[in-house]
Amino acid sequence: MELIDSHAHIQGKEFAGEADALIARAGEAGVEKIIAVGGAGDMSSNTEAVALAQSFPNVYATVGMHPHDAKDVGDDVLGAIRELTSHSKVIAVGETGLDYYYNHSPHDVQRRVFIQFIHMARETALPIVVHERDAAHDAVEMLRTEGGGKLRGVIHCFTGTYEAAREYLDLGFYLSFTGIITFKNAEPLREVVRKVPLQRMFVETDSPYLTPVPHRGKRNEPAYVRFVADMVAKIKTVSLEEVARTTTCNVRELFRF
Ligand SMILES: [Zn+2]
Ligand SMILES: [Zn+2]
């Protein structure tokens, strides 16, 4: 069985000095690749994601800046991120997007920076990794108008409605699901998983956050993506092997491994 953890922040301080053990445990759990997602916090999360990708053959990196930190994104940061996109193991721009739930950056600033990253993805011909919370209307609109019909990507940690899911699917985007789908109160989201075609889905951990049941409450890590895939299998009444095979194929298709 081959799984891919399509979104993990393994470069974070939570895992300092543990990369070897972490990646080995993932391998034992059938996780053949890990996407180290940059842009959580500051520029070091990007450079460290790229450094991990350089050190480990089965780790790839994305570079961007989280919408929480959009207020700190000036031309210098954008330039530095743009430079990192030319690294051979950087496979996407992100994470970027809109978060109207926490509002750590003003909405207009989030929108400006999101547009800049959409343009960067187009110019570099890389897919985009989108974080969107309580902002589906604006995100869909911006991906459509600024993406110019050529942009491809994934909406990571999807927690929205089926109507929003439909809009993203119509734009050609993939939807990625986390351990949230294993949580007791997530029945509405499981209903969305039931309706979204497996051929358009990724699974991810978003480590170190969102730890799936049965490890909820502990630190999350890429090996646990298996529990997310297992829940998808249960919801869709297919085998875990089929979920692994199809989602892995989807991730490979988008990121062109
Ligand atoms: Zn996110
Ligand atoms: Zn993330």
Image: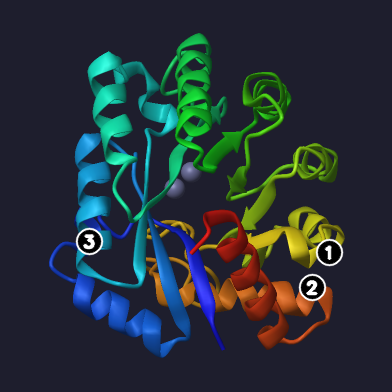
Residue 150, above or below 227: above
Q: CA distance from mark 3 to mark 2?
A: 37 Å
Label 3: how many residues lie within 10 Å, few (<14), some (14-19) or many (20+)?
some
Tell me: 146 left or right of 110.
Answer: right
Tell me: 250 left or right of 51.
Answer: right
Amino acid marked by disc 3: Gln
As helix, strand or loop, the secondary structure at mark 1 comes to helix
Residue 83, above or below 156: above
Indicate if the residue with disc 3 has its beta carbon within 8 Å of ligand 2: no
Image marks 1 and 2: residues in contact by CB distance under 8 Å:
yes
In the picture, the quarter occupied by the N terminus is: bottom right
Q: CA distance from mark 3 to mark 1?
A: 37 Å
Asked if residue 12 shows in the view, the reply is no
Q: CA distance from mark 1 to mark 2?
A: 6 Å
Residue bearing the label numbered 3: 54
Image marks 3 and 1: residues in contact by CB distance under 8 Å:
no
Instruction: Give residue 33's quadrant in the image.
Output: bottom left
Residue bearing the label numbered 2: 235
Say whether disc 1 or disc 2 marks the residue closer to the N-terminus. Answer: 1
Indicate if the residue with disc 2 has its beta carbon within 8 Å of ligand 1: no
